[in-house]
Image (tube, coloured by chain):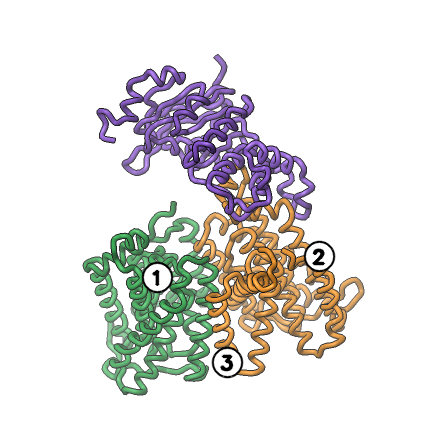
Chain colours: A green, B orange, C purple
Amino acid sequence: MTPVDLLGQALNGLAYGVLLFLLSVGLTLIFGMLDVVNLAHGSFYMLGAFAGLGLIAATGSFWAALVLAPVVVGVVGALVERTCLRPLYRRAVLDQVLLTFGLIYLFEDVVKWIWGGRIRSIPGPALFSGSVKIAGAAFPAYRLFVIVFGLAIAVVLWLVIERTRLGSIVRAGVWDAEMTAGMGIDIDRVFTGVFAGGAALAGLSGVIAGPIRSAYPAMGSEILVVTLIVVVVGGLGSLKGSLAGSLIIGQAETFGKAWLPETAMLIIYVVMALVVLFRPQGLFGRPLR
Amino acid sequence: MRLARPGGFVALLALLAVFPLFAGNYPVKLLHEILIWGVFAMSLDLLMGYTGLVSFGHSAFFGLGGYVAALALLRWPGATAALLLPAVAAALAALVIGFFSIRVSGVYFIMLTLAFSQMFYAVAFQAEWLGSNDGISGVPRPVVVGLSLAAPRVFHLFLVGFFGLAGLALWRVVRSPFGHVLRGIAENEGRMAAVGYPVARYKLLAFVIAGTVAGLAGSLFTQLNGYVSPDAFFWTTSGEALLMVILGGTGTLGGAFLGAAAFTLLQSLVSSYTERWMLILGLTFVLFVLFAPGGIVGVLRGRIGLRA
Amino acid sequence: MTAPLLAIEHVSRHFGALSALNGVSLSVAARERRAVIGPNGAGKTTLFNVITGQLAPSAGAIRFEGRAIVGLAPHAIARRGISRSFQRTNLFPRLAVGENLRLAAAADGRGSWNVLGSVDRLAAPLGRAREVAEAVGLAERLAEPAGRLSYGEQRQLEVGVALATVPRLLLLDEPTAGMSPEETARMTRLLQALPREMTLLIIEHDMDVVFSLADRISVLHHGEVLCEGTPDEVRADARVYEVYLGTGDDR
């Protein structure tokens, strides 16, 4: 493998890692704050891709879809939180598993109903349809856009969570939801907001993934497991961990596929197993008692 | 508790044994799936309901049993290949996976067991000698004590017998002193350690027992279908077993079986009427959680007024 | 002088910058009834947690019957003959009272690995469970799930579970906390009636209980042993009053 190939793979891995970050950040915050294992988080990604598909067809503009699809998915997320998850916060984890598993089936089938089960390609924006020469090798411009866009979102998220009042409420909620509620904050609305925000980010991930990875109903349950791995590797409830985990898993899977195709699928599981065994709280998680 | 009365169980077995006399091929095939998934779900319930270990990687043992049976039956189609080897392989795998997984708990246990089962999936999916993503087909049914299980009626009775024995064994286990220790661990692990139980070792044995039974169920599944594919290892296989247990009601073996039956029937009945079976199944889960906590067994207890 | 049953030597335990135990030395003779008193935050429960292996000490040694027990897992320490009750009730709420006690009585492991037999065949733990239920006043409640007992009854069961393992050293962490005066009196009588072979180390805030039970008292303050002696000696020690009444102390 030449250095140029290496660079190409690293950029591919980075683009994939960015997608994973947008997915995992919502999942990790929802877990840290609401103590909910949301198996349907991958469905929001899938819904984002199909909402993007529909909106591009309706408006003819990728950019309109990029803005509107996350809004649509965020609203769906808010509805799910209000109607289904709210009654479950005090109940056993297994009830959450059953319910969110049910939602996976439900969303997947609704999408099949509307769009059929085929793999649909999503046209990327014309602006980034070409390729860029990096170190003499052509690299799809759209992937570079995904990387820059995703990292920009990461910076914005970091600023919101670390520097704003809203962010400090979210951080406090992840640390100790009951105490936060005791400080006179309407924790219910914060919960709905965080859940909807996480869903919208997953939806955003789905839209920008579309032109690279296409759209198909099972894409959500496929990416869910990888996202769970990212969250565990990075540390439950940790924003920093979610970023680090995404980049590590993104590179591990991409390079695994290029170098050791026979064992590529194994690698991310091995990474996670090692982390759980030797650093159970994850790279940036709070130490377990 | 009364749902698992021994008399009722024997009557159920008798009913199952004569079922093919009244039913056509398709219902019988469905029943076979229910019996195998029922055993698989009951073995998972030993972990989830009785020990408090939520495993998301039980498919590792189901798949391993299935693959070992497939490989072995192609060479020596006898009882050793059909039962002994899959059970031993699953037990050994459970010993190793359990040894590592039991060191962590909660979400971490879920994720670690998931990781191990996905590693099996990855190997089966990639290895050419395991047929890659097509799996292994053309697996013959064994000849056990001179009877060929290729004959449908014999295989049916074999399956019912397997279900009966596995159910009885698990029922004995959960009622044994060992089973009571498991329940103590599920209720309050810290206190069990404080009074002197080496909790990890008890959990490990439970994990091995559950894995062994799951391996046998996997072997039977291969024998039923004549093939095995990497799907047997995939996490959705674990997920479906998990759903069956929760749907039926955790901590009751009868519930796990009812959950398996409900899930299988729902899936096949709904899919024969409408393409939208996933939608209906999904809605069922959602409504179940929201309006019927405690699963099918919980609902039955509420309706008939049985004591919890 | 005979070797003590329990010897705690210069034990410290830090939580970050906070030191909950600071060089505590304490020895308890066989057949003794020792009370550990001290204001909240003095490190009493931490001391128990360190003895029973729930927490590892940052420094120091602990010997039980002459053998070092630091580093052993909680279950291994329990097997050596040390049992404890918890300050915050720590039971098996969905299991029956009888089963709570039977599990503890069967913790010696004999028969507990039997995977196919019946619980009813193991007579010894069942007998022990009934005996303890009688002693702690729960004989009528054997079939009731522990979670449905009243608070006072749960405290009785908490002590019962610790007793059922037949320990040589019994550690009780505030057995009468939150009890009514009648319940406290009954608990005191129960503890007084325990066989002398069961050495007792008890954390207690109720001074009536302490003085009617203890042979010796150790006073813990800020993670250190402030003083130790017979009830009369401790009663006469001015420092103890200072600690409790807050004279010259910000508490």
A220 with respect to C76 (left or right)? left
Query: What residue is disc 2 on?
Result: B6
Residue C191: x and y in percent read 50, 27
Q: Is residue B15 above or below residue C10?
A: below
Residue C49: x and y in percent read 42, 34
Q: Which of these two is toward me, A34 or A142?
A: A34
Mark 1 or 2: in front is 2
- Looking at the image, can residue A17 be seen? no
> Hey, what amino acid is under mark 2?
Pro
Q: Which of these two is toward me, A262 or B301?
A: B301
Query: What residue is disc 1 on?
Result: A30
> Hey, what amino acid is under mark 3?
Arg
Residue A87: x and y in percent read 41, 63
For marks 1 and 2, give the CA distance. 45 Å
Host chain of mark 3: B
Q: Which of these two is toward me, C213 or B210?
A: C213
Q: Are marks 3 and 1 on the same chain?
A: no
> Hey, what amino acid is under mark 1?
Ile
For marks 3 and 2, give the CA distance. 39 Å
